[in-house]
Image (spheres, rainbow, N blue to C red):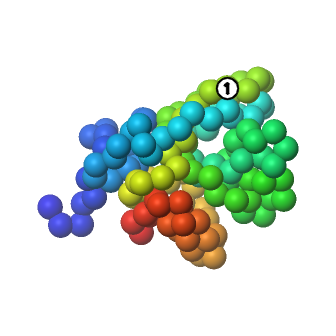
Amino acid sequence: MAGVIKTTSAFLRGAGHGFVGQLNYERANEEIVLAANIGAITAMTPLGALTSGGQYKPWAPAASDGTQTFAGFLWEDRPALATTQRAVRTCREATVNAHAITGWDALSTPNKAALVAAAKAMGIIILV
């Protein structure tokens, strides 16, 4: 059907729901540690890594703590915890439906362009 992008999940929610086409999970994904006290975050949230400690938080283009640099997408929903938690990020060799990215519609045009460029540099193609 023209105009419809097939994603990896028929339900359009859950782990990996925003990825398009074939994805080699073992090659595209890697385990990470999410920072404590970041609240619940959903799959397809763009991530950044803290300069101090290397833990991950949601990507924040205006930050100066390391999270201003895009570092991949969160693979699955994670609950709010007061401690760090293990998670998985997709950081290479993937194609993403832009409209499945958490917060995509709220991003400014320059931030969308920056995210697309940063993802492309990592080998992730964002279909807008």
User: What residue do we see at 35% from left, 43% from top?
Assistant: 24
Q: Quadrant of residue 39?
A: top right
Label total for image: 1
**Image coordinates for residue 9, horizontal then vertical, percent:** 31, 40
Q: In what quadrant of the picture does the N terminus appear?
A: bottom left
Q: Which residue is mark 1?
A: 85
User: What residue do we see at 67% from left, 32% from top?
Assistant: 33
**Image coordinates for residue 57, horizontal then vertical, percent:** 70, 43
Residue 113 in view of the camera = yes
Nearer to the camera, 113 or 105: 113
Which residue ends up furthest to the left in the rendered image? 1
In the shown orientation, is residue 22 left or right of residue 17?
left
User: What residue do we see at 44% from left, 45% from top?
Assistant: 28
Nearer to the camera, 32 or 14: 32
Neighbours of disc 1 within 10 Å: few (<14), some (14-19), many (20+)? some
Q: Is residue 15 above or below residue 102?
A: above
Q: In what quadrant of the picture does the C terminus appear?
A: bottom left
Q: Is residue 104 above or below residue 37?
A: below
In the shown orientation, is residue 114 left or right of residue 94?
right
**Amino acid marked by disc 1:** Gln
Q: Is residue 80 above or below residue 52?
A: above
Residue 98 in view of the camera = no
